[in-house]
Amino acid sequence: MFSMVINNGFVVDGTNRKGFYGNIGIEDGKIKAISKEQLQGKKVIDATGKIVAPGFIDPHGHVDGHEYAGELSACQGITTTIGGNCGLSPIAMNSFFEHQDSIGFPIHQAELVGHSFSLRKEVGIINEHAKATNKQIEEMARLAEIALKEGACGISFGLDYAPGSSIDEIKELVKVCSFYNKVCPIHSRLVTERDMNSLYELFSIAKETNATFLLSHFVYQYSASGIHMALRLVDKARENGLRMHMDSGMYTSWATYAGTATFEERSLKTNDLRLENIIVASGPYFGKRLNKELYYIMRNEYPQESLIYEEGTKEDVYACLKKSYCMPSTDIGAYKKGEGHPQIAGTFPKYIKEMVIDNKFLSIEECIYKGTKMPANLFGIKNKGTIEEGMDGDIIIFDLNRIEDKAKFPNEGYPDEKPVGMDYVIVNGQCVVENSVFTGSRSGRCIKLR
Ligand SMILES: [Zn+2]
């Protein structure tokens, strides 16, 4: 008798091998049995006609302990999120982990330590165009090393947000990360939106340091400059032995804070970003399109609110996610209810629907593998990412015929509208989503990577 069993489902186990009909027994938060025989349990879930898969591991999020972002992640099938991306993170990892684990959380959280906002601020760099001094670089490297020792899973960069970052500054931190065999997720610079210098810069650093890079939300960085050229360069870099991986969401229009360097006047000019392509994603002007007047209001009075920049095509997204080294990600941020970018609620259901059902770009096995075992392998997360005996009881059950994202852009509807078809999300053997309803369960734990 198990504490929970899932009977009659079609198991897609995350390893990329062919799916099979089977029954799963869970005990003490772990997968204890996978069987052709019907299993007995205190709680029995009948998964007839449904897919049973490992929970998704989102390699690029900004959940960072924010409750609603945790809920929205869970409801789209994410059971583990990697936080602290784009250079924005907690720095005192131990206290972040301790606090989170004392209150529990809907899903598991692994955490990066962030360079471009957080470490820079910690060593006293206020101006994002300023270069760090040698002393400041040393201090950032020291703090980053402590965070990695305390269990951070890598160092993240948001170079676009800290244009003053010198190559030396980046390289020193990348070296620390590489020494500990951890991952550097990088949100690249906007040198101009239409050239590839930002990629060449990373290749040269990777070559010198032998580090493992995860190119963050790639389609957001390069759809304006022609995604195919950018992808060809990454292919080539990989052929030359550089450790380049990539994540991408299901949308091409990206979001960030109104007050960032990205939306400075000079950045708008060099990158040819147009006000009429910008929509307000949060705050009192939610859903409004920018004009000159609203641009200054947002920059000056609401720098913490988010703006969405519209660009790119669906084909750009597909080109990325078809790559063998690209994994799906949300770029989810913390928003109030009713606000945000549809990526916060729609990404993974949209990924399954468009990549597997609508366009048949991926088999269901590849689709699950790219969102589970692939990120688990990259970050070195053991015990997660596959359905095998002994693995953690992080499981999703969904209806392949019904799965669909419902989240809309702010000018069209609710960005946080939950998907349909994601029936069960199980974290450490507890249902955080049951019959598509969020239960408020807090069985998620922090993942400290040593
Ligand atoms: Zn980013």
Image (spheres, rainbow, N blue to C red):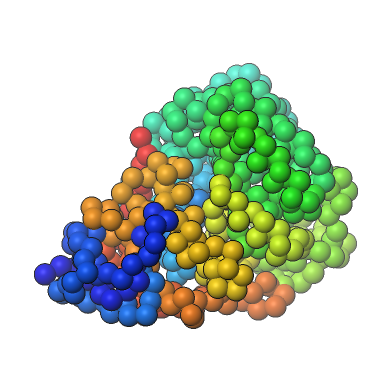
Residue lying at the far top of the rendered structure: 134
Question: Considering depth in this image, is 344 or 15 the residue closer to the camera?
Answer: 15
Q: Quadrant of the N terminus?
A: bottom left
Q: Is residue 413 above or below residue 376?
A: below
Q: Quadrant of residue 70?
A: bottom left
Q: Position of residue 172 (x, y in %)?
A: 58, 24
Q: Quadrant of the C terminus?
A: top left
Q: Which residue is at 37% across, 80% downward? A: 49
Q: Position of residue 212 (x, y in %)?
A: 53, 34
Does any portion of residue 124 appear in the rendered image? no
Q: Position of residue 144 (x, y in %)?
A: 49, 31
Q: Is residue 151 left or right of residue 337?
A: left
Q: Is residue 82 left or right of residue 200?
A: left
Q: Is residue 205 above or below residue 70?
A: above
Question: Considering depth in this image, is 41 or 20 the residue closer to the camera?
Answer: 20
Q: Quadrant of residue 318?
A: bottom right
Q: Is residue 72 above or below residue 46?
A: above
Q: Which residue is at 45% across, 70% downward? A: 75
Q: Is residue 176 left or right of residue 133?
A: left
Q: Quadrant of residue 287?
A: bottom right
Does any portion of residue 315 appear in the rendered image? yes
Residue lying at the far left of the rendered structure: 1
Q: Is residue 319 left or right of residue 111?
A: right
Residue lying at the far front of the rendered structure: 18
Q: Which residue is at 67% across, 37% downward? A: 236
Q: Which residue is at 46% across, 49% downward? A: 374
Q: Position of residue 74 (x, y in %)?
A: 43, 66
